[in-house]
C-alpha cells in the first residue's frame, strides 16, 4: 500500500486509507484486529477532516433521503456491515449521530474510516458530535488507551482537536431534528 508520494513528510492518500480499512470486509471478524496505517497518514487525515468540519455549520441542514445511524462505539465490523446494507458513501447519504469511539476494540479503525469518508465525500457523509467525542469521556472509556497502546498520546490529542470542530445537530428536510442524546462539556 502506497501512502506517501515523494516528500519526507508524506502526502495524504485518503484512497489508500479507505482501501486498507475496507480490506477487512472479506475477512472473518476478529475484534481488536488492527489495520496498520502510518501515524502520519492519520494525522494528515485529521487535519483534512478538521478543515472540512470547520467549513460546515454547527447545525447541518440536510436533504432526504438520508441513512441515519446511532452509536458505533468502535464496533468496526458493525460499521462495515452498515455500509454493506446501506450502500457505499459514494452512492448513499449518511448522517451519524455520534459516539464513534470507546467501548469497542477498534475505535481507531472506526473513526479513521469515518474521517476518510468525511474527507472524501463532505457533501453526503455527515457526522455529529456525541458525548464520547469529548476528551474527558474518551480518556476514561478506552479510546485514549487504544491510541496510547498503538500509536502515541499525541494522536489522541489530534483526534480530540478534530472532535471539537464537529457539528452538534442536523435538520433533515426542515422536519427531522437529529442530535446525540448526551453532550459533554
Image: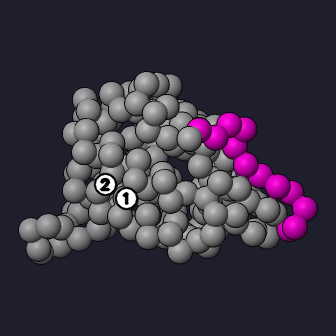
Give SS at disc 2: helix
Q: Quadrant of the N terminus?
A: bottom left
Residue 177 visible in the shown view: yes
- In the displayed structure, does residue 88 sit left or right of residue 85? left
Query: Which residue is label 1 attached to?
Result: 46
Of the two numbered discs 2 and 1 in the rendering, the one whose residue sits closer to the viewer: 1
Residue 158 horizontal/vertical position (percent): 33, 51
Q: Residues within 10 Å of mark 1 (few under 14, many from 20)?
A: many
Q: Quadrant of the C terminus?
A: top right
Q: Nearer the viewer, residue 141 or 17?
A: 141
Residue under pointer 2: 42
Relative horizontal placement of residue 23, taking residue 124 as reference (left or right) = left
Labels 2 & 1 near each other (Cβ < 8 A): yes
Residue 70 quadrant: top right
| Residue 93 visible from this viewpoint | no
Chosen colour scheme: one colour
173 relative to 21, above or below = below
Place of residue 137 in the rendered image (x, y in percent of width and height, measured from the top left): 49, 31
Outermost residue to the left: 8
Query: Eyeballing the image, is 9 above or below 178?
Result: below
Q: Which of the pair 42/174 is nearer the observer?
A: 174
Q: Which residues are magenta?
A: 173-184
Amino acid at each position: 500500500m502506497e501512502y506517501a508520494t515523494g516528500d519526507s513528510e508524506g502526502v495524504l492518500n485518503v484512497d489508500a486509507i479507505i482501501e486498507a480499512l475496507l480490506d477487512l470486509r472479506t475477512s472473518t471478524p476478529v475484534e481488536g484486529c488492527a489495520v496498520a496505517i502510518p501515524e502520519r497518514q492519520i494525522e494528515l487525515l485529521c487535519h483534512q477532516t478538521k478543515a472540512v468540519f470547520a467549513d460546515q455549520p454547527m447545525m447541518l441542514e440536510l436533504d432526504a433521503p438520508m441513512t441515519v445511524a446511532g452509536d458505533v462505539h468502535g464496533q468496526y465490523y458493525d460499521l462495515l456491515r452498515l455500509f454493506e446494507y446501506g450502500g457505499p458513501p459514494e452512492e448513499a447519504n449518511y448522517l451519524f449521530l455520534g459516539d464513534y469511539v470507546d467501548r469497542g476494540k477498534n475505535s481507531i479503525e472506526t473513526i479513521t474510516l469515518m474521517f476518510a469518508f468525511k474527507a472524501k465525500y463532505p457533501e453526503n457523509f455527515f457526522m455529529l458530535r456525541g458525548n464520547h467525542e469529548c476528551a474527558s469521556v474518551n480518556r476514561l472509556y478506552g479510546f485514549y488507551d487504544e491510541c496510547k497502546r498503538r500509536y502515541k498520546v499525541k494522536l489522541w490529542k489530534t483526534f480530540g482537536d478534530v472532535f471539537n470542530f464537529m457539528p452538534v445537530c442536523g435538520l433533515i428536510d426542515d422536519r427531522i431534528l437529529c442530535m446525540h442524546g448526551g453532550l459533554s462539556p
